[in-house]
């Protein structure tokens, strides 16, 4: 697995949204996007 670097391009990925739909990085092609990951509530982070 390649390391990610701040400011670098993200590899293609897909995630499941709260409503069960699938969100893909490609859905935002050509647009600026900030991706923020955080630990599940009430878990050590």
Image: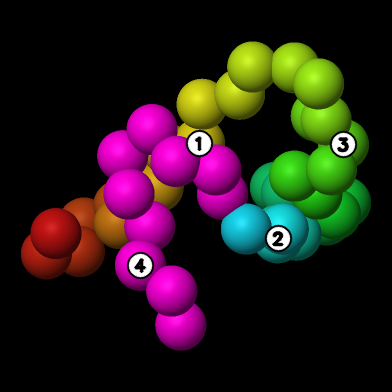
Q: Quadrant of residue 16?
A: bottom right
Is residue 43 in view from this perspective?
Answer: yes
For the residues labelled 2 and 3, the Cα–Cα distance comes to 10 Å
Q: Earlier in the sequence, mark 1 or mark 3?
A: 3
Q: Is residue 8 left or right of residue 32?
A: left
Quadrant position of the C terminus in the picture:
bottom left
Who's the residue at 64% across and 17% down the image?
Answer: 32
Q: Earlier in the sequence, mark 2 or mark 3?
A: 2
As drawn, which residue projects farthest toward the bottom? 1
Who's the residue at 11% across and 64% down the image?
Answer: 44
For the residues labelled 1 and 3, the Cα–Cα distance comes to 13 Å
For the residues labelled 4 and 1, the Cα–Cα distance comes to 16 Å
For the residues labelled 2 and 1, the Cα–Cα distance comes to 11 Å
For the residues labelled 3 and 4, the Cα–Cα distance comes to 23 Å
Contact between marks 4 and 2 (CB within 8 A): the answer is: no
Q: Quadrant of residue 42?
A: bottom left
Q: Mark 3 highlights which residue? A: 27
Q: Mark 2 highlights which residue? A: 13
Q: Mark 4 highlights which residue? A: 3
Circle 4 or circle 2, nearest the eye: 4
Magenta residues span 1-10
- Determine whether the residue tagged by mark 3 lies in a helix, strand or loop: helix
Q: Quadrant of residue 3?
A: bottom left
**How far across and how far down the image is residue 38, in percent?**
33, 48
Is-magenta flag for residue 22? Answer: no
Circle 4 or circle 1, nearest the eye: 4
Q: Mark 1 highlights which residue? A: 35
**How far across and how far down the image is residue 21, in percent?**
88, 51
Q: Earlier in the sequence, mark 3 or mark 4?
A: 4
- Determine whether the residue tagged by mark 1 lies in a helix, strand or loop: loop
């Amino acid at each position: 697995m390649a390391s990610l670097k701040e400011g670098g391009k993200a590899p293609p990925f897909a995630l499941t949204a709260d409503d069960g739909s699938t969100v893909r990085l490609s859905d935002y092609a050509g647009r600026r996007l900030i991706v923020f990951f955080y630990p599940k509530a009430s878990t050590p982070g």
